Image (cartoon, rainbow, N blue to C red):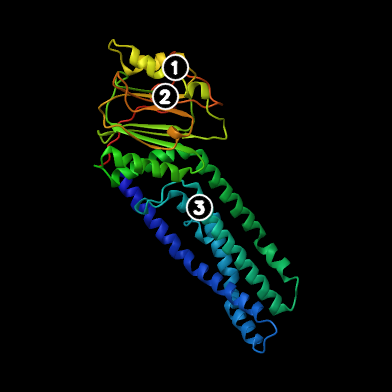
Amino acid sequence: MQYFFSKVIDEQRQAACFAQMAPYENKIRSAWNALQAMHKNHGAENYQTYVNMFKDECANAQCSDAAHGLLNTLTGQGSFVQCDMLTVLYAGNPEGHYFKGVRDEVVSKSGYLQSLVAMGITSQSAYQSLMNNDKDAWKVVNNQFSGDVSTAINHIKEYNGICQQQLMPNVQENTMRLLHENPNLDNNPWSGILYNMAKTMAPEFLTQATVYNDISGFDNHYLTGYSDRTVGMLHLNGKYNMQVTYIDPRVGGPMTNSVNSPNPVNIVNSNTDAHNARYYANQISHADCWTGMMVVVNGLNYWTTGEIMNSGYMQFHPTTNANYVLQLWAQNGYPCIIENESRVAELLMNQQEMNLIQQ
């Protein structure tokens, strides 16, 4: 039940923070609109009316307090230490399929808050200039906010880095949460759900998501390779094996000799003797330079969704004469797979076999 309770806590924290932040957002937008109206009507007969309306918006430190309040949500400091919006945005909202660690969401929404702060500071500067008849009042206001603004920017940069560094663990955690919401879906829709979540997490990468029935043992499936952007989740709910693979085209292009090689299918189809998945993976890895591979026995309701298989990086064979599914990728920038116990990472890159049950 841990994912259920963590989901509830995340939603409560998010709702509380948004409730605390909303009055400040409304005040800054109202003051900003009044400031724009004042400038637009400069020289008009009723200009002073617009000046007074703007002054009313920022009187009694309303604009200053609102800007400071939003800054506190971005820095996690001051009276809002219990409401760090970067932490809230990073945690996501599972109920709304807003996933944990989505970099675009964290950075864009915190950037929006930062823009509101800038509007609040500008409004406060204009207010002080009017009240003191001092065109340089903005310098004093700027000094009052500059420290916290720098702290907020650094905090945003920090979470931008965390989103990138924790991509694969967050993909795994988001999958666990989705399993709680969709415990009995068939493999076909699950591969689509898994792909959509993974793509949302890192839209800049080529993405592939694979789901097949739960099975164990190297006789039946063998997954191996070198990549810091592949996560495997095995024996989920006693129903599924899942894999998400990312390819960053900036690292290197496809190894075309391998991708176009006839060896994988020839090796599998030419061996009429009974061999297991690990045997075929071993033979294939010695024939060409592959940076990742998946060899899975047929008959496991195997589904895969994504663009890697059509991107020039991958050979994908949904069936062979030897009754195995082959998914092989080769990218410049990574070493070739060589089958020996000291180098190869069995059962999915940088992952250990898991037995996970969501209730």
The C terminus lies in quadrant: top left
Q: Position of residue 129 (x, y in %)?
A: 71, 75
Q: Is residue 77 visible?
A: no
Closer to us: mark 1 or mark 3? Answer: 1
* Residue at image mark 2: 293
Q: Amino acid at mark 1?
A: Ser
Q: Are marks 1 and 2 in contact (CB under 8 Å)?
A: yes
Look at the numbered disc 3 and give the secondary structure of its residue.
Answer: helix
Q: Nearer the viewer, residue 94 or 240?
A: 240
Place residue 280 in its image quadrant.
top left
CA gap between label 1 and label 2 equals 9 Å
Other residues around mark 2 within 10 Å, as few (<14) / some (14–19) / many (≥20): many
Q: Amino acid at mark 3?
A: Leu
Q: Position of residue 74 (x, y in %)?
A: 54, 56
Other residues around mark 3 within 10 Å, as few (<14) / some (14–19) / many (≥20): many
* Residue at image mark 1: 285
Q: N-terminal of the two: label 1 or label 2?
A: 1
Look at the numbered disc 1 and give the secondary structure of its residue.
Answer: helix
* Residue at image mark 3: 86
Q: Position of residue 284 (x, y in %)?
A: 42, 16
Place residue 267 in its image quadrant.
top left
Direction from residue 326 to residue 343 in the image, left or right: right
Can you name the residue that lies furthest to the top here? Answer: 273
Report the residue at 29% width, 11% height from top.
272
Look at the numbered disc 2 and give the secondary structure of its residue.
Answer: strand
